[in-house]
Image: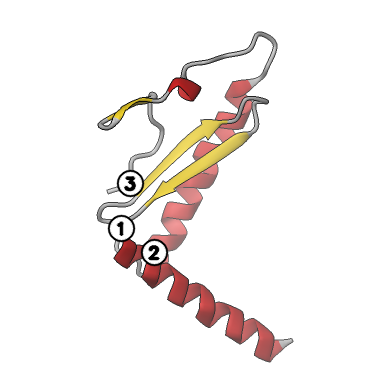
Amino acid sequence: MCDFGGDGFEVEGLDPDALLWVRGVDYLTGWRDAARVAGELGDVLTAVGVDLEGVKLRAGTTANGSGVVRLELPAATAREIAKLAQTAAAQCRRAG
């Protein structure tokens, strides 16, 4: 299932960027936005029938405090999402 959030400690090791903070930077607002968007993305992928087995969506922030969503997924799932995006793009071109 999806792994929303994260604490910087992954199976592969420590993510130093997840632990470095700069005084005065509002990381919480960026993280909250990224967490919300990660949830929305997970919901949309589920709604269009994408199997979320093995998919990881993680909210984080950049050095300047803006939100970032990290997406990790199996190649088969990436292929499935790419096909959905190609179909949607083709429909948009025909409609436009």
| Residue 45 position within the rendered picture, expressed as x and y whole percent measured from the top left | 42, 62
Colour scheme in use: secondary structure
Relative to 29, is 44 above or below?
A: below
Which amino acid type corresponds to the residue marked 2 in the rendered image? Ala
Which amino acid type corresponds to the residue marked 1 in the rendered image? Pro
Q: Which residue is identified by label 1?
A: 74
Question: Of circles 2 and 3, which is in front?
Answer: 2
Q: Residue at x 42, y 53 (%)?
A: 42
| Residue 52 position within the rendered picture, expressed as x and y whole percent measured from the top left | 31, 57
Q: Quadrant of residue 80?
A: bottom left
Q: Residue at x 55, y 78 (%)?
A: 88
Which amino acid type corresponds to the residue marked 3 in the rendered image? Cys
Evaluate if marks 2 and 1 touch, with contact meaning CB atoms under 8 Å apart.
Answer: yes
Is residue 78 among what the camera can see? yes
Q: Quadrant of residue 4?
A: top left
Q: Nearer the viewer, residue 77 or 45?
A: 77
| Residue 41 position within the rendered picture, expressed as x and y whole percent measured from the top left | 48, 54
Q: Which residue is identified by label 2?
A: 78
Question: Of circles 3 and 1, which is in front?
Answer: 1
Q: Residue at x 26, y 52 (%)?
A: 54
Relative to 68, is 42 above or below?
A: below
Specify few, some or many for label 2: CA neighbours under 10 Å numbering under 14, 14-19, or 20 or more.
some
Of the numbered discs in the image, which one, if any, rests on residue 2? 3
